[in-house]
Image (cartoon, rainbow, N blue to C red):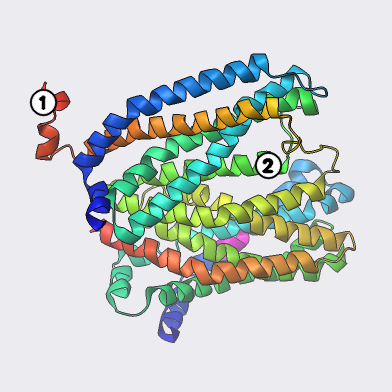
Amino acid sequence: MFKWIHRFGSAPFVYRLAGALSPWVGMACLILLCAGIYIGLVVAPSDYEQGESYRIIYVHVPAAILSMFVYVVMAIASAIFLIWRLKLADVVAQASAPIGASFTFLALVTGSLWGKPMWGTWWIWDGRLTSELLLLFLYFGYMALRAAIEQPQSAARAAAVLAVVGVINIPIIHYSVEWWSTLHQPATISKMGESSMHPSMKRPLFMMIFGFQLLYAYVLLIRMRTGILQREARTSWVAQLPEVARD
Amino acid sequence: MRCIFQREWSVAMRNPGQWVNPLLFFIVVVTLFPLGVGPSPQTLSTIAPGVLWVSALLAVLLSLGALFDADYSDGTLEQLALSGQSLPVIVLAKVLVHWLLSGMPLLLMSPVLGLLLNLPSQAIPVLMVSLLLGTLSLSLIGAIGAALTVGLNQAGVLLSLLVLPLSVPVLIFGSSAVAAAAGDFAASGQLLALLALLILALSLAPLMASLALRNGVSGGT
């Protein structure tokens, strides 16, 4: 059992595993996303209140879910790195940060595009939009801290502490912002009834969420391979890799 | 803990800039707002809670940049980390002294600034209690940021980028407590939320800050 787990601490093993997995993950992701987009944009019926504009949900909701999911993955990886000093956990956290920031940015942009026809303005200080914006700042802070410290090991540990502090704070920030936004605006914006969605609309949504998750996994695997190569650039196993040894 | 406290206190008292500058910053920023948005008493009393709170937040954050820097550059921090004393306790003592010298003056000055901004007088006690609870939490949260950025160039801007998102809950509850009191509503709910945040920060922030500090000290050598 421990031997089995131990292999995941070995950089060459994970490098090869990621290389073997990534084409399959990429294919599955492509199929799911294509099917999800087609069913979501063409097959699913239009909403009786929002017409066709609701269809942006198929990008907005998966991006928003992933933006938080990636941060949690990052924080768990950082905690593993801090506790067990597993270097590959830090590779996961470092590789995840820009992906998570992109998903957050996508969720903000699609949210404001959706806001224009629905609320009549590009931006509203809605609780969920505001906490998404703060999440983007947390990602930026993580990446900026990492970039600012020159010594890689020290940068990794500092960033890991920050990610753990951030994940403790995210629920507090989220609920305080929700509370604040209900205090400041009358509840004219009814919540988009996600729970009361018709199955024909829900099915493509779940396909898209799962597809986005696979997209994250795919990009993560590629970025992890790059991260491992950068860290282990001076070792003999990297020098012996066929794709490196060629030049 | 008492020795650290006394040492910090005497070091800080010999360097008046440490507690005078944040206070001056607070006063100047608050003064800028009437010049920016116009002197109408009506407008001022509406924005007063937010202005006072945002200015206090920025003043605390700016003063935090120097929390560990002097000790880092002359090696004291390394000695403290090696001393075998519990580092979280040392961090807590440093933060408390820092708060007494930067948060406390803000607290004492805030009623005067509240009057300048035409804040209704019944809101002033709430303003002071909310600042008491809130600036202490901000000092604790900021200590994590200061510990993470210890010894870096450009630490000031980075510190703000790291800590500002984390300080949002304190800002929300603090300014809304004052706004509620100004509108003759009960503010106890917001104050209790601030107290809860303070207790959370008090229990976790010294641990996190000392973890970051230990890393900063060992990484620098």
Amino acid type for the residue under numbered disc 1: Ala
Image quadrant in which the C terminus of chain A is located: top left
Q: Is residue A117 above or below residue A5?
A: above
Disc 2: which residue? A128
* Residue B47 screen position, x and y as percent: 79, 50
Marks 1 and 2 on same chain? yes
Is B149 rendered above or below residue B199? above
Q: Secondary structure at mark 1?
A: helix
The magenta stretch spans which residues? Answer: B20-24
Q: Earlier in the sequence, mark 1 or mark 2?
A: 2
State the residue in front, B198 or B143. Answer: B198
Residue closest to the eye, A190 or B179? A190
Q: Is residue B118 magenta?
A: no
Residue A245: give its label.
1
Marked residue chain, label 1: A
Q: Residues within 10 Å of mark 1 (few under 14, many from 20)?
A: few
Write down the quadrant of residue B30 in the picture.
Answer: bottom right
